[in-house]
Image: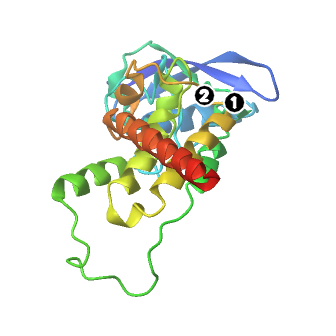
Amino acid sequence: MSGNMTINLKIWRQTGDKGAFETIKVPNVSPDMSFLEMLDEANELLMKQNTEPFAFDHDCREGICGMCSLVINGVPHGPDYAITTCQLHMRSFKDGDIIVVEPWRASAFPIIKDCVVDRTAFDRIIAAGGFISVNTGSAQDANNIPVPKVDADKSFDAAACIGCGACVAACKNASAMLFVAAKVSHLALLPQGKVERTKRVLNMVEQMDKEGFGNCTNLYECEAACPKEISVDNIARMNREYLGANIMHDEVIRTAKL
C-alpha cells in the first residue's frame, strides 16, 4: 500500500514478577491509524501466528477515560503534547522506526500483565477524600451560591484530571502529587467543598503516602506529561491546604487538652 509504513514494535511482556521486551514487525501501517489501532493490528498478526496477543489497557479511545496507559519511547502517552495514547497517530513516526512500548513504572502501580497496571491506588486516594455536605434533591438556583469566575475556572481546570497516571509515570520519584492536588483543588476552590476541606486534604495525602508514591521534587515532568495540562499550581495549593489543615488540627488538639 502506497504511503504505508513498517513499524518494529519492542513491547513489554510480563506475567508474574518477571518480564522482557518482545519485538514484533507490523507491516502496512497507515499514517492515519491511531496508536491503539496499530497495536490492534499487531495483535491480529500474533493471533494469526497462533501466538498469544499482548495485553494493553484501553476503553473510550476518545481521550476521556485515561485508560490507555503506555510509555512510548520513554514518554507517557507518546511524543505528542497534551494527548492520551489513543489520540496519538502513526504519522508521528517514520517507516522502519523502532517503537519501545512499556507500562507505567511505579511500585504503587503493580503490573497485572504485559502493559496493564493496577491503578486502584488512585481509587483509594479518592475514597479517602470522602464526601461533600450538599443536600440531595433538585439542583439549587445558580445564583444561590455565587462563585467567583476565577475560582470556578481554576476548579474546572483541576477537575479535568482523568486519573490516567501519566504524572506518576513521568516522575522520577513516581509521585502522585499532581493527581492528588488536582482532586483536592477541585473541591477546595468551591463553596460546596469547604466544609470537609481540612479532613479531605489530610486523609488524601495520608492515603497517598500509604500507597507508596514518591515525593515531589518540583521538576514539573508531571505537568509536561499530563494529557489535560493540569498545572503544578495545584500542588502549591494543596501544600497550603495541607499546612493549614495541620495547623488547625494541632490547634484543636491543644485546645482540647486545656
Residue at the image position 67 percent from the left and 31 percent from the top: 212
Disc sitting over residue 249 in the figure = none
Where is residue 236? Give x, y as percent. Answer: 36, 34
Q: Which sits in the foreground, 82 or 212?
A: 212
Colouring style: rainbow
Q: Which sits in the foreground, 174 or 61?
A: 174
Check if mark 1's residue and mark 2's residue have beta carbons within 8 Å.
yes
The residue sitting at the right extreme is 16
Q: Earlier in the sequence, mark 1 or mark 2?
A: 2
- Disc nearest the viewer among 1 and 2: 2
**Residue 89 can be seen in this image:** yes
The residue sitting at the front extreme is 258
**Residue type marked 1:** Asp
Mark 2 Cα-neighbour bin, 10 Å: few <14, some 14–19, many ≥20: many
Q: Is residue 17 left or right of residue 88?
A: right
Where is residue 112? Give x, y as percent. Answer: 73, 36
Q: Is residue 70 above or below residue 67?
A: above
**Residue type marked 2:** Pro
Residue at the image position 36 percent from the left and 16 percent from the top: 94
The residue sitting at the bottom extreme is 138
Disc sitting over residue 103 in the figure = 2
Quarter holding the N terminus is: top left
Q: Give the CA separation, mark 1 to mark 2.
A: 7 Å
Q: Under tag 1, what secondary structure?
A: loop
Residue at the image position 68 percent from the left and 37 percent from the top: 210
Where is residue 193? Give x, y as percent. Answer: 41, 62
Where is residue 110? Give x, y as percent. Answer: 71, 32
Disc sitting over residue 114 in the figure = 1
